[in-house]
Image (spheres, coloured by chain):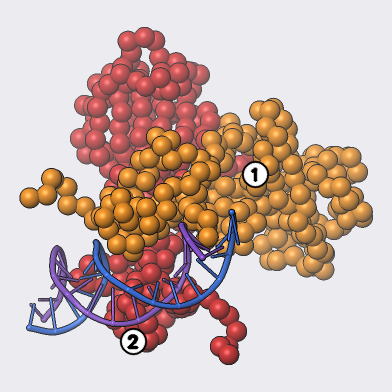
Chain colours: A red, B orange, C blue, D purple
DNA sequence: TAGTGGTCTAGACCACGTG
DNA sequence: ACGTGGTCTAGACCACTAT
């Protein structure tokens, strides 16, 4: 007797919400109707509406905020990120006219993990610097990078951390070389809870994890890094 | 008066479940306790347990099946996928001793989209073959690839589709060349609902979308493809 | 104070799978 | 017939934000 489809109400409401977000009826950074309004509109229990919203939120469309409402997420159009043997993040963004900045969240000197020791070909007893770098584009957090450098290759590195804005600027200005990309491993994952906080992103939006090994022009490894980049904000281009 | 943490019950139950899956208490392909059992165990309402399970499922740990129970997902350890200018999927898997197969889901001859026309440098009026290829490793669906080829370059291509197992075998055996990778674009996304069905995967597990342009050894483009690969089953390695 | 989303209870009926 | 998960109702209290 009913029209046609037999779909769960909460799924229909979720589709209704997503449809209206897609078409701009519910605009970015604006609120969707409150739970109570949706209850009235669809003549259903609040729980059903909440189930629908939970789904829409989990798919990354909205972010509910207690006491305020449910806001439509900005849908970033992905920025292209060219990975070649020599490209740097900042040059990449500059060439596309994208405003960007880097921030050193923290650093330490410590003993390397087994993986780091192997990749950087470290001798026993050698220590490394670990840096956590947060990158923004257009004032939006984009990526967190854990980068590991052999202490032996970078004497007095922390001296250059004041007014940090780019690791490669430091390397070029004070160590007079530019690392060359040796290999990168790409994997699509979900963000760790810690990264969710740092990147201020929904926890169900995928991230691209890029594990890279960079070499000195002389041929030996100098940097091992793991970046977690918002998947909805970047496309990584590799030319062969 | 309560111990310490003030966390929502459903979050605590979700953590309990994930913890037990991690440590193998709830084994792969086995069922977690039923909703009712969890209700009794934690002395909470069924709705709370369902909220917890919804979260755990959305994070990709379990898949609820109506009438049966809630099964712990197999957590695949990712297979390495080397992308270089000349590597093929099958050679990649062979070299790692991974059992694999390919299946042609469907094909058609049609007019190209604007994107396809540009990438393949097609003349006006040229048509293309579109193939949907499903790949398995160890009998698990791994990826769906939409691949587009200019009809003009591949006369009678559909004649070779019986007993399809690898597109590149056809190209090598009947057209006597092997495409060379020109460039690939990587993006981490969530799967489209259609891909969820084809790949029989949870809809919240990320996928790696790889858009590639392949060229003929003679230098002109011959294949434009978009692959969606389960993120938890692959790592893509690029050497520079 | 009023409105928002967050949490939780209690109970009902349905659809599916197994016996 | 029974147990499983899926859907939905009705109502309560809390925490946060705005005014």
Give the CA separation, mark 2 to mark 1. Answer: 45 Å
Identify the residue at the far bottom of this view. A1
Answer few, some or many: residues within 10 Å of disc 2's Cα (few below 14, many 20 plus, some between 14 and 19). few
In the image, residue A89 sits, relative to residue D18, either above or below, namely above
Q: Chain of mark 2?
A: A
> Which quadrant of the figure contains the C terminus of chain A?
top right
Seen in the image, is B77 located left or right of residue A177?
Answer: right
Q: Is residue A125 visible?
A: yes
Residue A200 seen anywhere in this rendered image of the structure? no
Query: Who's the residue at 65% across and 56% down the image?
Result: B198
Q: Are marks 2 and 1 on the same chain?
A: no
Describe residue B214's horizontal placement relative to residue A32 as left or right. right
Q: Name the residue at 86% across, 47% down.
A: B163
**A140 or B232: nearer the viewer:** B232
Nearer to us in this view, B43 or A138:
B43
Q: Position of residue A11 (x, y in %)?
A: 47, 73
A12 and A19: which one is in front?
Answer: A12
Helix, strand, or loop for circle 1?
A: strand
Kindly identify the residue that appears in the image at 45 percent across and 18 percent down: A118
> Where, by quadrant of the figure, is residue B19 drawn?
top left
In the rendered image of this protein, does residue B109 appear above or below residue A174?
A: below
**Whole-percent x, y for residue A55 in the image:** 42, 66
Judged left or right of residue A155, residue C13 is right
Q: Position of residue B200 (x, y in %)?
A: 61, 53
x and y percentages locating residue B219 in the rendered image: 77, 44
Quadrant of residue B138 within the rendered picture: top right
Residue receiving disc 2: A40
Residue at mark 1: B140
In the image: residue B212, left or right of residue A15: right
Q: The N terminus of chain A is located in which quarter? A: bottom right
């Amino acid at each position: 007797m009913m029209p046609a489809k037999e779909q769960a109400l909460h799924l229909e409401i979720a589709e209704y919400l997503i449809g209206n977000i897609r078409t701009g009826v519910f605009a970015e950074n604006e609120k969707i109707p409150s739970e109570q309004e949706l209850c009235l509109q669809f003549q259903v229990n609040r729980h059903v509406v909440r189930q629908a919203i939970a789904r829409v939120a989990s798919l990354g469309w909205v972010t509910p905020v207690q006491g305020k409402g449910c806001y439509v997420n900005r849908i970033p159009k992905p920025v292209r990120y060219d990975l070649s043997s020599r490209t740097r993040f900042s040059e990449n963004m500059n060439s596309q006219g994208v405003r960007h900045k880097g921030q050193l969240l923290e650093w330490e000197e410590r003993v390397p993990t087994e993986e780091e020791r192997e990749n950087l070909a470290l001798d026993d007893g050698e220590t490394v610097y670990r840096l956590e770098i947060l990158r923004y584009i257009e004032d939006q957090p984009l990526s967190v990078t854990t980068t590991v450098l052999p202490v032996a290759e970078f004497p007095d590195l922390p001296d250059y951390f004041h007014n940090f804005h780019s690791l490669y600027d430091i390397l070029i200005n004070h160590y007079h070389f530019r690392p060359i990309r040796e290999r990168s491993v790409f994997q699509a994952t979900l963000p760790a809870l810690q990264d969710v906080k740092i990147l201020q992103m929904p926890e169900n939006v995928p991230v691209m994890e890029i594990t890279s090994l960079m070499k000195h022009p002389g041929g030996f490894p100098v940097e091992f890094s793991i970046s977690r980049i918002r998947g909805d904000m970047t496309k990584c281009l590799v030319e062969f």
